[in-house]
Amino acid sequence: MTSVIERPTSFSYFLRKLQQVSVKMSSDFVWAIKNGDLEQVKDIIEKKSLNVNEEVDGRPLILYAADYGQKDVIDYLISAGADVNSKDKHGITAILAAIWEGHKDCVKLLLEKGAKKEGVAPDGKTYLESAENNEIKQMLMA
C-alpha cells in the first residue's frame, strides 16, 4: 500500500489553508457584528475590501446585526452598500429579524433607509402580524 504525503507546496494544501483562514475570518467577523464592535467591523471591511452583501452561512451580514440589535453596525453596513432588503436562505430580511427580536431602534433605522415594511415571514404572517411590540406595530402601520 502506498501513501501519498501531501507536501506544503501543493495547491490543495494552500487552498485548504486559505479556506481555514476564510472560515476563521468569517466567524470573527460575525462575532464582531453580533457584539456591535463597530471598529472591528469597519477595519475588516475596509482592510479586506469585503463585499458587505456577502453571505456567511446563508445569511447576509446585515441580518446578523439586526438579530442582535446592533443599530450602529446596521447603519455602517448600509452606508457601505448593504442591501436593506436582502433575504437569507429562509426568506428572512433584516427588518423581520429586528421585528421578531423587538429591536425598535433597528426597525426605525431600517425603515428610514428604505426597508420594505410589507412582507411575509416564513410562517406566513405579515410583518405587522409578526410584531409583538406596539411601537414597532405603529412604525409598520405609518
Image (cartoon, rainbow, N blue to C red):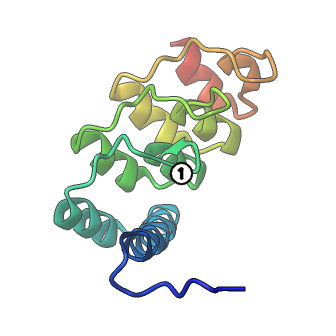
- Which residue is at a point 69% across and 29% down the rendered structure image? 134
- Residue 40 drawn above or below residue 79: below
For the residue pair 77 and 130, the one nearer the viewer reads as 77
- Which residue is at a point 36% across and 22% down the rendered structure image? 114
31 vs 121, left or right, is: left
Amino acid carrying mark 1 in the image:
Tyr
Counting from the top left corner in percent of width and height, residue 95 is at: 54, 32
- Residue 122 drawn above or below residue 103: above
Density class for disc 1 (Cα within 10 Å; few <14, some 14-19, many ≥20) is many
Image quadrant for the N terminus? bottom right
- Residue 39 drawn above or below residue 97: below
Residue 21 position by quadrant: bottom left
Q: Count all numbered tags in the image, as a single digit.
A: 1
Farthest front residue in view: 1
- Mark 1 highlights which residue? 64
100 vs 22, left or right, is: right
For the residue pair 47 and 18, the one nearer the viewer reads as 18
For the residue pair 17 and 62, the one nearer the viewer reads as 17
| Badge 1 element | helix
